[in-house]
Image (spheres, rainbow, N blue to C red):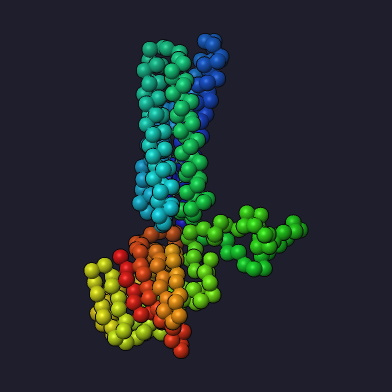
């Protein structure tokens, strides 16, 4: 696969949309042109666009299903994806029906009837709805996207002399900032109090250290004694040494190939105790964005003289 393209779906969708839209428009034109010589040519072109479009839509749907199973996504994106799929399957079924119907119509030498035209319009509306929902997945939810622009406080100016900065506008829209920095970036720092940010930074540091390939690296982010507890599904480790020697050691080489992305759902600080509820995604360190796995987790941290330390982590 070409590195910047997450899967084949974004390639096939353009054939589906272009061919089937042109087919629908040509059928409508031919329906209003009466039965003369030029209308016959338009109808032939419409038929081929419909047949080719329907055939390629089978590939678009297959690639879409494959994409849905491979791109990194959170709960909100999952719902949006299910909605897109629902529209896509209905629309694809309508166009396949129309393609078969059209074979019969051409064989019998029939013209484009009213019912055929109305079903075609319905399918075109479905195609528009499907496409918009697909775009929503990419441009709102960030699915299949490798990186988002990092908006810094300074912003930048265009060399062409256009005088605006991408970070200076008051509203996120006016400043072209991606909404809430969108999902693929770590949510640490967004909407968190300074104390909560510190806690999340410690948790993020721990996850980064896990992927460093060094067994000792995560130690500085945890209570490295008997107070540490790790629950991973049904697996329980009590004490840092137990986790490090009987769990982490075996996974260290695999962890060194990936990175974690944390999406904080809730962070709460009460005195010297903090809890963070978050979603983690496991992604390749380099190459296309791809989900190797994800989970929900709750972490408890305690404030020490040396900063926040992880006391307990429960993942599932
Ligand atoms: C009639 C069939 C379909 C059409 C016309 C269609 C259209 C689109 C469009 C226009 C996009 C945005 C692409 C971009 O901006 O690069 C998209 C993205 C997407 N669609 Fe579809 N889609 C179809 C079927 C499906 C199906 C059946 C699924 C399965 C759930 C699916 C899953 C996705 C996913 C996951 C994305 C995000 C980008 C990616 O990873 O490829 N699509 N779709």
Tell whether 65 sits left or right of 36: left
Name above or below for residue 281 compared with residue 9. below
Q: Position of residue 175 (x, y in %)?
A: 65, 57
Please indicate, yes or no, whether residue 21 appears anywhere in the rendered image: yes
Query: Which one is nearer the viewer's eye here, 180 or 40?
Result: 180
The answer to which image quadrant residue 254 occupies is bottom left
Tell whether 93 sits left or right of 139: left
Q: Position of residue 27 (x, y in %)?
A: 50, 21
Residue at (30, 78) in percent of width and height:
229
Residue at (53, 17) in percent of width and height:
30
Residue at (39, 29) in percent of width and height:
94
Name above or below for residue 132 compared with residue 76. above
Question: For ligand 1, which image quadrant applies?
Answer: top left
Residue at (36, 48) in percent of width and height:
66
Position of the C terminus, as image quadrant, is bottom left
Q: Residue at the far bottom: name it.
A: 305
Name above or below for residue 171 compared with residue 112. below
Please indicate, yes or no, whether residue 218 appears anywhere in the rendered image: no
Q: Position of residue 151 (x, y in %)?
A: 60, 64
Q: Position of residue 63 (x, y in %)?
A: 38, 45
Q: How many marks?
A: 0
């Amino acid at each position: 696969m070409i590195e910047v393209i997450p899967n084949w779906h974004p390639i096939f969708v353009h054939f589906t949309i272009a061919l089937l839209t042109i087919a629908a428009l040509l059928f409508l034109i031919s329906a209003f042109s009466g039965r003369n010589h030029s209308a016959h040519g338009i109808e032939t072109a419409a038929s081929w666009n419909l047949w080719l479009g329907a055939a390629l839509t089978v590939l678009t749907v297959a690639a879409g299903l494959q994409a849905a199973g491979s791109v990194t996504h959170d709960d909100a994106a999952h719902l949006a994806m299910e909605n897109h799929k629902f529209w896509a399957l209905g629309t694809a079924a309508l166009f396949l029906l129309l393609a078969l119907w059209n074979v019969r119509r051409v064989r019998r030498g029939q013209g484009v009837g009213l019912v055929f035209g109305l079903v075609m319009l319905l399918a075109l509306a479905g195609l528009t709805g499907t496409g918009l929902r697909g775009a929503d997945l990419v441009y709102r939810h960030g699915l299949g996207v490798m990186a988002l622009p990092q908006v810094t406080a300074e912003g930048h100016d265009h060399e062409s002399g256009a005088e605006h900065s991408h970070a200076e506008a008051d509203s996120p829209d006016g400043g072209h900032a991606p909404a809430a920095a969108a999902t693929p970036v770590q949510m640490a720092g967004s909407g968190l109090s300074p104390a909560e940010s510190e806690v999340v930074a410690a948790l993020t540091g721990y996850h980064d250290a896990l992927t460093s390939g060094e067994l000792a690296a995560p130690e500085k982010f945890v209570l490295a004694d008997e107070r540490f507890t790790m629950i991973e599904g049904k697996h329980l480790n009590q004490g840092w040494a137990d986790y490090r020697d009987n769990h982490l050691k075996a996974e260290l080489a695999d962890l060194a190939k990936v990175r974690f992305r944390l999406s904080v759902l809730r962070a709460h600080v009460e005195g010297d105790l903090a809890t963070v509820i978050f979603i983690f995604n496991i992604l390749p360190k380099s190459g296309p964005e791809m989900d190797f796995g994800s989970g929900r987790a709750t972490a408890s941290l305690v404030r020490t003289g040396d900063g926040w330390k992880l006391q307990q982590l429960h993942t599932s």
